[in-house]
């Protein structure tokens, strides 16, 4: 099957042609603004002027005519509306004129499938990092699902904004990478990881402030990369552990960065996993990736009429059926993403020893700071929870110098596994709603409220664990962030049971006077996503 794919979600319009697993051609034209970032209408004008020449060059390079094409695929979203409409119009015109079947493709799906095709990856966790997208994606139950993403600005966009403010041309990523290579001073930038989600707006604000204070551009850029990339690798590692996967795929425009590739590769070796780093030529937006995604959709039986191909600016990858992927997983290990956990005894009692792991991919100065702050915070939040009657494992011993805690051993299973095994989880979700409401009423946030960070013991009692990223006293947004992480956790792992969230919410609303305010903040957080 020969497939022609047309890409045009942002600054690049491209055409790629595939024959089975062979890339016959991939031709692109990129809009480069004279100053500032991407202007959607100007980019769309560029695309309209170049889409036909790009298609012709691609056909010529492949040595075929349009009549040899069996399927046309185009990027239906997510992306900039004016740009999407240009390529959609071109694709529909070719389809109608030459009577060739047409499919609209999700842009991130293209990135992951071209990466899988060019490597031997079977079922990876994908870290997808580009201008507008920063997501951790993995396949589960017949489709790709987003397990973590930026809650404010895409990393690529943040790098572009920094470069623009510092007077460097678009795109900013390559210039920042060059400057970072000669930097060495690690500046204290916000390290904002929330479960498997990230936030980069604080780094942007702090970096501009450091420049006003006279710090050098190389040191600022070095610190940006070390901090932001460590955040990304951490959430990818957490997803590997959470999902039991053994492969990592790095994709997207920012994936060309040598330091990020080095950090991903180092993390994968530390975890005994395989890392696949997409060929730099195909990290950038291109038509071949759209052709590949369209090919797999069509071969799996998906069909679209012309009226089904309206562009979707907020098109989510988890809206696409992807039954062609065979999901795999490893047995879950005692060692988590952040710590080594071992059974032990303490003064005759059954206990758990938890030691936070040094991360080789992180700058040693940053790594030391993160491990120290998290172990102290975990103990502090656990004590505050105990004070208000929330169950957490009792802390027996705490040694911050060795990043080690010895705590009570709870005999039970994770909430994640409990929900999978329960036929009727309504009671446990109502119980959970009341407990979280009590925690929030006392202005305590957990900071990583996923179903993997709760244990259900043999009597059905719920214990909260690993509140190392929690806060007290919390701001309203931090309480809402707890709910956001829980809701995302339920959707990603138990999305076929939407009643779980509703049972939780019913109890939560009944037991906290702040419910309306917290839920209003939750809506604000959800609306910040670039593509929702």
Image: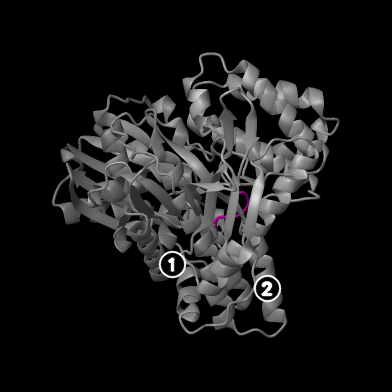
Q: Is residue 277 magenta?
A: no
Q: Nearer the viewer, mark 2 or mark 1?
A: 1
Image point 72% across, 49% down: which residue? Answer: 381
Q: Callout 2: helix, strand or loop? A: helix
Q: Name the one closer to the observer, 270 or 114.
A: 270
First in sequence: mark 2 or mark 1?
2
Whole-percent x, y for residue 80 in the image = 53, 48
Whole-percent x, y for residue 266 in the image = 37, 64
Q: Which residues are magenta?
A: 150-154
Q: Is residue 113 left or right of residue 513?
A: left
The 10 Å Cα crowd at callout 1, few under 14, some 14 to 19, many 20 or more, is few
Image point 37% across, 28% down: which residue? Answer: 142
Give the residue number, with chain letter if any, for mark 1.
360
Give the residue number, with chain letter if any, for mark 2.
208
Is 275 rendered above or below residue 515?
below
Image point 39% across, 28% down: which residue? Answer: 141
Q: Is residue 351 left or right of residue 471?
A: left
Given contact means CB atoms under 8 Å apart, are the residues at marks 2 and 1 in contact? no
How is colour applied across the structure in the image? Answer: one colour
The quadrant in which the C terminus is found is top right
The 10 Å Cα crowd at callout 2, few under 14, some 14 to 19, many 20 or more, is some
Query: Whole-Å distance between the Cαs marked 2 and 1?
Result: 28 Å
Secondary structure that dominates the magenta span: loop
Whole-percent x, y for residue 375 in the image = 62, 57
Give the residue furthest to the left.
63
Give the residue furthest to the right.
513
Q: Name the one closer to the observer, 349 or 111.
A: 349
Q: Callout 1: helix, strand or loop? A: loop
- Can I make out residue 150 in this image? no
């Amino acid at each position: 099957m020969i497939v022609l794919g047309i890409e045009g979600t942002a600054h690049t319009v491209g055409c790629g042609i595939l024959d089975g697993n062979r890339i016959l051609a991939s031709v692109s034209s990129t809009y480069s603004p004279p100053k500032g970032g991407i202007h959607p209408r100007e980019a769309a004008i560029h695309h309209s002027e170049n889409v036909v020449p790009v298609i012709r060059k691609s056909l010529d390079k492949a040595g075929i005519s349009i009549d040899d094409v069996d399927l046309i695929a185009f990027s239906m979203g997510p992306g900039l509306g004016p740009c999407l409409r240009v390529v959609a119009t071109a694709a529909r015109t070719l389809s109608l004129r030459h009577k060739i079947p047409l499919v609209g493709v999700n842009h991130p799906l293209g990135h992951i499938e071209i990466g899988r095709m060019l490597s031997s990856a079977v079922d990876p966790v994908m870290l997808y990092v580009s201008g507008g997208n920063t997501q951790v994606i993995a396949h589960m139950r017949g489709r790709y699902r987003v397990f973590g993403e930026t809650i404010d600005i895409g990393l690529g966009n943040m790098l572009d904004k920094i470069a623009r403010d510092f007077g460097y041309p678009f795109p900013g990523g390559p210039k920042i990478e060059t400057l970072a290579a000669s930097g060495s001073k690690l500046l204290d930038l916000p390290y904002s990881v929330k479960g498997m989600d990230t936030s980069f707006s604080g780094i942007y604000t702090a970096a501009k402030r450091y420049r006003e204070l006279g710090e050098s551009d190389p040191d600022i850029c070095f610190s940006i990369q070390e901090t932001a990339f460590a955040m990304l690798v951490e959430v990818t590692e957490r997803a590997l552990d959470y999902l039991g996967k053994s492969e990592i795929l790095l994709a997207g425009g920012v994936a060309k960065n040598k330091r990020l590739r080095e950090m991903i590769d180092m993390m994968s070796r530390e975890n005994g996993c395989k890392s696949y780093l997409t060929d730099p030529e195909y990290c950038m937006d291109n038509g071949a990736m759209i052709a590949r995604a369209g090919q797999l959709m069509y071969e799996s039986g998906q069909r679209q009429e012309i009226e089904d191909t309206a562009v979707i600016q907020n098109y989510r990858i988890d809206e696409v059926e992807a039954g062609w992927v065979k999901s795999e997983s490893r047995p879950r290990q005692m060692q988590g993403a952040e710590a080594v956990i071992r059974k032990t005894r303490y003064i005759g009692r059954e206990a758990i020893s938890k030691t936070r792991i040094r991360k080789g991919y992180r700058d040693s100065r940053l790594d030391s700071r993160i491990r120290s702050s998290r172990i102290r915070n975990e103990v502090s939040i656990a004590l505050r929870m105990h004070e208000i009657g929330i169950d957490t494992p009792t802390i027996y011993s705490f040694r911050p110098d060795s990043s080690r805690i010895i705590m009570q051993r709870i005999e039970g299973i994770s909430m994640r596994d409990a929900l999978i095994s329960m036929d009727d989880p309504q009671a446990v979700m109502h119980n959970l709603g009341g407990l979280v409401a009590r925690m929030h009423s006392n202005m305590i946030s957990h900071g990583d409220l996923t179903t993997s960070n709760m244990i259900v013991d043999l009597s059905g009692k719920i214990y909260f664990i690993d509140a190392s990223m929690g806060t007290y006293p919390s701001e309203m947004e931090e309480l809402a962030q707890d709910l956001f992480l829980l809701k995302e956790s339920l959707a990603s792992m138990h999305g076929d049971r939407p009643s779980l969230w509703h049972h939780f919410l019913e109890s939560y609303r009944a037991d906290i006077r702040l419910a309306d305010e917290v839920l209003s903040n939750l809506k604000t957080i959800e609306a910040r996503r670039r593509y929702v």
